[in-house]
Image (cartoon, rainbow, N blue to C red):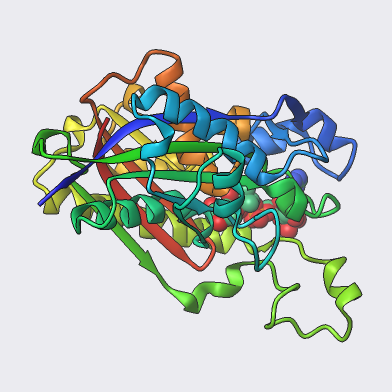
Amino acid sequence: MAYAAFRSIGGYAPSKILSNEDLSKMVDTSDEWITKRTGIKERRIAANDEFTSDMGVKAAQKAIERSGIDKSEIDMIVCATISPDYFCMPSTATIISTKLGLENVTAFDISAACTGFVYILSIAKAFIESGMKKNILIVGAEKLSAITDYSDRGTCILFGDGAGAAIISATDNKEEAIIDIHTGADGRFADLLMTPNGGSGSAHDSLEQEASSCFMQMKGNETFKVAVKTLTKDVVDILNENNIQGSDIKHFVPHQANYRIIKAVGDALKLKDEQIVITVEKYGNTSGASIPMAINEIYENGTLKAGELMLLDAFGGGLTWGSALVPF
Ligand code: ACO
């Protein structure tokens, strides 16, 4: 059986910064409130003509360059996004494949909100272990500014744009292999985090009305409580099942939604601050892009070295959640 290895990482953040100070001129909020409740100081916003696929391509180009494989060897692209270039079709993954100059690859998107990257990692692992594919490009890319209501202070302070990508390849070496991945979902909590309009479940009379309100809505406080409880259980389970201690983890790379959620889960695992990767202050919550952007950050600043063990965890709309034990 082939094993699946995490071969390389790439990331991209747009240059335009939206600071807490900027937001305090748009809605009734303050830098102090946002920093204290979330840890976020600023987030990046894509240009009007910069699509989710464009950011995904920039992150993918870095991942491909760093992987040592030729792009023609990529046989599948999976994109995790809740802010695709086009709702329904074509998928953002197919647009990315064309912008990268790839032909004849399997390409599709998945929707698992902030857990998207853990989901696509598990899909890549399964396709490689089954022998169906050898080199898979996975991309988490989001233009959340396109689906954010900038008059709602409960959500607009949280989200930002960006992309991250990784190459997952077949290997015979078990030492390099992704150790384990958990994924879960519970639709009973669907109304905690939704874009209620724009789909077949929408109750609006006219398409025009729908299009004007295709924004994310969130019951933040309830989401927060479920997130801490679910994530803590999931990371404890994945470590126990694989006989790995918190101290064996070199880099805990959680989804970057809220510093307080990250800290609560880190404390439950008794992790030291230097084990926990935090980028939420710079980029806010970039949903499916947040974990690969965070991995890219520690790769580019020289903290992440080959062979080091990462623990990933994520939680998002659906509700969905997941965790993964991944040697770099
Ligand atoms: N500025 C100032 N005050 C605010 C703001 C703001 N931006 N937003 C809310 N408030 C007010 C509320 O109106 C409320 O006022 P009240 O007490 O007078 O009623 C008060 O602050 C407290 O509001 P809460 O919602 O209880 O604040 P909380 O401490 O829960 O923080 C937050 C809100 C940051 C949204 C937090 O709940 C959170 O991070 N939730 C989880 C988000 C998450 O993890 N989502 C999953 C991934 S996202 C995805 O899948 C796309």
Q: What's the residue at 51%, 43% (across, down)?
A: 102
Would you identify the image quadrant in which residue 326 lies? Answer: top left
Total numbered badges shown on the rendered structure: 0
Position of 260 with respect to 16 (left or right) is left
Quarter of the image that includes the C terminus: top left
Q: What's the residue at 18%, 31% (across, down)?
A: 247
Q: Position of residue 75 (x, y in %)?
A: 37, 48
The residue lying toward the viewer, choosing from 25 and 121, is 121
The residue lying toward the viewer, choosing from 215 and 60, is 60
Residue 118 vs 217, above or below: the answer is: above
Residue 192 vs 253, above or below: the answer is: below
Residue 119 visible here: yes
Position of 318 with respect to 157 (left or right) is left
Kindly give the residue lying farthest to the top in the view shown.
302
Residue 128 vs 298, above or below: the answer is: below
Q: What's the residue at 28%, 18% (across, down)?
A: 305
Would you identify the image quadrant in which residue 83 lies? Answer: bottom right
Would you identify the image quadrant in which residue 178 lies? Answer: top left
Q: Position of residue 295 (x, y in %)?
A: 42, 30
Residue 261 visible here: no
The residue lying toward the viewer, choosing from 246 and 186, is 186
Q: Position of residue 298 (x, y in %)?
A: 42, 22
The residue lying toward the viewer, choosing from 147 and 24, is 147
Q: What's the residue at 44%, 30% (across, down)?
A: 63
Q: Position of residue 45 (x, y in %)?
A: 74, 36
Position of 290 with respect to 252 (left or right) is right
